[in-house]
Amino acid sequence: MPQARDAKAPGGAGTGQGAADMVVVMKERASDAQIEKVVAHLVEFGMDVHRSTGAARTVIGAVGQRAVDPRLIEMLEGVHEVLRITEPYKLASRSFKPENTVIVLDDVRIGGDEVIVMAGPCSAETEEQVDTTAAAVKRAGAKVLRGGAFKPRSSPYSFQGLGEEGLRMLRSAANAHNLKLVSEVMDTTQIDLIERYCDIFQVGARNMQNYSLLRELGRTRKPVLLKRGISATIEEWLLSAEYVLGGGNSQVILCERGIRTFESYTRNTLDISAIPVVQQLSHLPVLVDPSHGTGRRDKVAPMARAAVAAGADGLLIEVHCDPDHALSDGAQSMFPAQFDRLMAELRIIAPAIGRTICVEPMARRGWGTSRSTVDSR
Ligand code: PEP
Ligand code: MN
């Protein structure tokens, strides 16, 4: 009996699989009609299908609930072989989708050649604080404003965020400075509100395993930045991404933000090695948050440089116009001038590994130009 082989990326773990999770490799000269017939069969079996058209051949990833005999597909004309996806996560795996996912928000492309920097305060506090910080990060080359309005604080006595008022401040600063906006959603009841103000939902480390929240976000059509859980393995993290992808939202951005270890000098231990590991296992973009990863502003720049050198698709960095008086995470928030210097350093590192980054800060081009930043090629 023909046996479907495994399409497990090296380093993948886990054995969970259904016969319905498969990769169909077409013959080099398979015709469009043959490819379409295979896709039609898979869809008929109730499968989620992703078609990757390579230079030489087409590969079709298919994931479904129902068990499907791979021989039914192997027998179709133009099929070279059928492999099983053996990773426990399917839609997030490179076997399912070999090419990188690029998330496009107008002129901001996350997961493409350009390293995208998202920066701003931990929390929105006042109109002036949000606007001053947004102007500073834009000037330095950030493309996305970050800022929390609903804060998951370890202590119920700490500042919990301004709620909708904070979202309003963040949106207005993002619009004024031509930035996209990412902000944290803490539970399902906040989704509609946050969707009205933000371009990207942030799921915090503490909520990485809030499966009802992930499922609901799977039904939205805005990108989801999914932080790695405080003690989560990479496999658990990718399984959480699978909840969002499984709901039909293909726009997941992963974000490494440090994990809890025995080391207490830094707030968390930033797992730089997660970048190449994730990039091998998954097609999803991966960002790094060196602010929560270290908890100390003097350690943020070295880790940000390391993350870009290791191939991160972007960074999420806390910057505050007056960090000494911040209502949350002041110790890890950079001064605008520090952030500006870091961006200048990243402009040297990124091209060394074939990436681009915003090369021309607004300060040097002035306001009012139609394209405020340009890419180096
Ligand atoms: C944050 O980004 O402000 C935050 C709370 O991050 P994390 O979920 O990684 O702790
Ligand atoms: Mn924070």
Image (cartoon, rainbow, N blue to C red):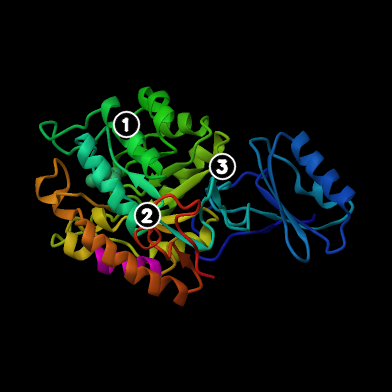
Instruction: Give the numbered dot on residue 142.
Output: 2
Q: Is residue 63 above or below residue 257?
A: above
Residue 164 in the image: state x and y as whole percent. Answer: 30, 25
Residue stretch in magenta: 300-308
Q: Position of residue 19 (x, y in %)?
A: 67, 45
Horizontal relation, residue 139 to residue 111: left or right? left
Q: Secondary structure at mark 3?
A: loop
- Amino acid beneath label 2: Ala
Picture quadrant of residue 65? top right
Residue at position x 81%, y 40% in the image: 41
Q: Would residue 303 be counted in the magenta stretch?
A: yes
- Depth check, front residue: 98 or 120: 120
Sequence-first tag of 3 and 1: 1
SS at mark 2? loop
Viewport quadrant of the N terminus: bottom right
The three-letter code of the residue at mark 1 reads: Leu
Q: Classify residue 226 as left or right of residue 154.
A: right
Where residue 250 is drawn, which disc sits there? Answer: 3
